[in-house]
Image: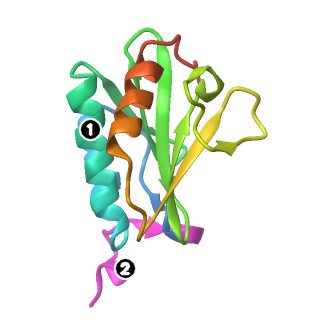
Amino acid sequence: MSDRGKKDGPTLLSGGNPQIPKGEGNEPVRDYIAAMPDWKQDIGRRLDDLIVAIVPDVHKAVKWNQPHYGHDDDGWFLSFRCYTDYVQVQFLRGTSLEPMPPKASKHSEVRYLDIHEDDELDEKQLRSWVKQASGLPGERM
């Protein structure tokens, strides 16, 4: 039986986004990443490792079926989620980043980076954005 068919495995929502119960800490984020389908799981691990390397004391949680990263008492600065053809990184104060991440949002301050399977990830730029984002006031949710 495939992982999708197991009763105790996570459900994949439309676009392949794992449905993981909300929770604070590393464990729910680990569960989310482990449930990411196919090549997206490697992207999830790379993102999590990169964020932790840049912000060692980062606070993690799963909210609205996506991992969130922030500071304990200062809100969230980044999240990501799976879509059918890409993983989307959400910078919650992305309009304050230099340069701004490429994709606009209907939310005035949010900017996105979509990572597709065959994309060459500009890790230097991603590191810069994570570092900048982690230094901005977080978004309370």
Rendering quarter of residue 108: top right
Left or right of residue 68, residue 113 in this image? right
Left or right of residue 64, residue 22 in this image? left
Label 2 sits on residue? 4
Q: Which mark is residue 50?
A: 1
**On screen, 49 above or below 72?**
below
Find the magenta span and give its range: 1-15
Rendering quarter of residue 99: top right
CA gap between label 1 and label 2 equals 28 Å
**Residue name at image x 39 percent, y 28 percent:** 128
**Residue name at image x 20 percent, y 30 percent:** 53
Disc 2, SS? helix
In magenta stretch: residue 13? yes
In this view, the residue in front, 121 or 6, is 121
Where in the figure is residue 40, as x and y percent of width and height?
37, 64
**Residue name at image x 41 percent, y 23 percent:** 70
Disc 1, SS? helix
Q: Residues within 10 Å of mark 2 (few under 14, many from 20)?
A: few
Q: What amino acid type should be assigned to the residue bearing mark 1?
A: Leu
> Is residue 136 something one can see in this rendering?
yes
Q: What amino acid type should be assigned to the residue bearing mark 2?
A: Arg
In this view, the residue in front, 60 or 109, is 109
Left or right of residue 139, residue 127 in this image? left
Quarter of the figure with the C terminus? top right
Where in the figure is residue 27, as x and y percent of width and height?
24, 41
Cβ atoms at labels 1 and 2 below 8 Å apart: no
Label 1 or label 2, whichever comes before in sequence order: 2
